[in-house]
Image (cartoon, rainbow, N blue to C red):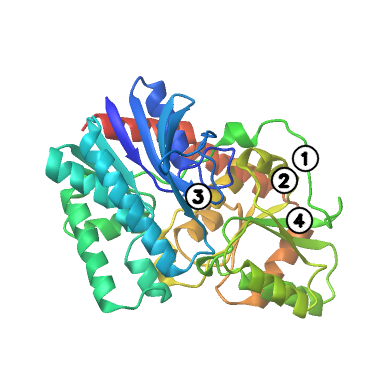
Amino acid sequence: MYILYFHQHFSTPDGSGGTRSYEMAKRLVAEGHKVTMVCGSYAQGQTGLTEPFHNAKRSGSYEGIDIIEFELGYSNYDSLLKRTWTFLLFAMRSIYIAITHPADIVFATTTPLTAALPGLAAKWVKRRKFIFEVRDLWPELPKAMGVITNPIVLGAMALLEKMAYKSADRLIGLSPGIVDGIAKHGIDRDRIALIPNGCDIELFSNPVQKWRPEGVGHDDFMAIFTGTHGKANGLSAVVNAANVLKQRKVENIKLVLVGDGKEKPDLIKQVQSRGLGDYIIFHDPVPKRQLVGLMQSADLGLQILANVPAFYYGTSPNKFFDYLAAGLPVLTNYPGWVADLVTENKCGIAVAPDDADAFADALLAMKRADMNVAKRNSLDLAQQRFLRNKLSKGFVKFIISL
C-alpha cells in the first residue's frame, strides 16, 4: 500500500522531539508498504533531510521513509497568532499534496487539529481512505487552559473536530480519555483504536556512556524532566517543590529540567530570584539518542503537567514512556490514567496537584528508599503493556486492514 502520512512535527531520534511517527512509519516500511511523510520544520526536530530548501520545500528519503518537508519553522516561543498561521500554512500546502500525490490511504496525526484538513480533502475530493490519529482533544484542551477564548474560533474548531471524526474511516486515540472523547461524538467504537505511545526499550537499554549535567554530582539524587517548558507543562510545580526542599535544608537532590519552551526564561528567573540554583539545573534540549545516557544515569523521571482536568485522561506523554523504557521510577503530580499506572504497578509515586509539600515529601521518600523494585516494575510495565514493537504491529494491522 501507498500511505501518505501527515505529521507537522515529525522527528527522527536525531532530534529531541517525539518519535512516534518515525517509529510507526519505519514499521510500515518494514512490512513492505510505501510511506511518504509530509511535515514541517520543528525547532527541536530533525527530519533526516539536510539539503537546502528549494521554493520552501525539500524532499528525500530517510531509512526508507520518503519525506516532504516544508520550510515552515515552528517553536514553542512563537506567539499564538504566529503558530496559528504556521498551522494553517502547513494544512494548505498539505492539501495540495493530499489531492495530487498517489495514495491508497491518507493518514493524519495531530497536533494541531488543522492536521485533519489534508485528510478531509483527500477523502472528499479523491475519495481516498482517511485515518485520523488524535494525540490531544481539541478544542477541549486549549479551551480548558484558557489559551483560546474566542467563541467563534472555538466554534470553528469544534466543527472541524466533528467533521474529522465523522469523515475518517478509522480513528486512533492515544489515551483512554481521547478514545472516549472521540466516541462521545457518536462515533462507533469499532472504528476507534486505542494505541498509546510506546516504550523504545531497545534504544534505552543500549550500552552507552552515562552522563550527568554540569552541577550534578555522582552522589546526588537526580530527578529529570525531559520535554517542552510550556504553559501546559506546569513546571512551576518543580520550582515550588525545590523551594520546600531549600526551606527544609535538604541536600543532594538535583531536579534537572531538560528542554526548551516559552516558559523557560520565566522559570530561570524564578529559580534565580528564589535562590534555588543548588536544586534546579536547566539543560538545553538533547537528541533522543544522546538522552539515553542521561536517562541511564538518572534516579527518577518527573511526569509533570499543569493542573487541568482535561489532561487527566486526555494525554499520552512521550516522556512518561521513555522513563519506563529506561527503567526509571516516576513521580507524577496530576491524577488520571498515568497516575493510576504508576500507583497500581508500584513504579513510583503520584502526588496531588499544586501541593509543593507533598511533592517534596515524595522526592525525599524516593531518595531514601531502595529504588530497585520500582525500577524493575517500570521496566516490567514497559515490556508487558507498552512495548513499541508490539504496539506498532497493532498499528500496522489496523491501518492496512482498512
Mark 3 vs 4, N-terminal side: 3
Bin the neighbour count of mark 2 within 10 Å (Cα to Cα): few under 14, some 14-19, many 20 and up. Answer: many
Q: Which residue is mark 2?
A: 294
Is label 3 or label 2 in front?
3
| Badge 3 or badge 2: first in the primary sequence | 3
Query: Are the residues at dot 1 and dot 2 in contact (C-beta closer than 8 Å)?
Result: yes
Task: Identify which amino acid the numbered label 2 is placed on.
Answer: Leu
Cα separation, mark 1 vs mark 4, equals: 13 Å
Q: Residue 210, labelled with which disc?
A: 1
In which image quadrant can residue 98 be found? top left
Residue at (23, 71) in percent of width and height: 155
Which sits earlier in the primary sequence, circle 1 or circle 4? Answer: 1
Labels 1, 4: front one: 1
Residue identified by numbered label 3: 42
Neighbourhood count class around disc 3 (C-alpha, 10 Å): few under 14, some 14–19, many 20 upward: many
Instruction: Of the two numbered discs 1 and 2 on the same chain, state the one appearing first in sequence.
Output: 1
Residue at the extreme front of the image, as rendered: 55
Callout 1: few (<14), some (14-19), or many (20+) C-alpha neighbours within 10 Å? Answer: some
Q: Where does the N terminus fall, quadrant-wise?
A: top left
- Residue at far top of view: 32
Quote the CA–CA distance across marks 1 and 3. Answer: 27 Å
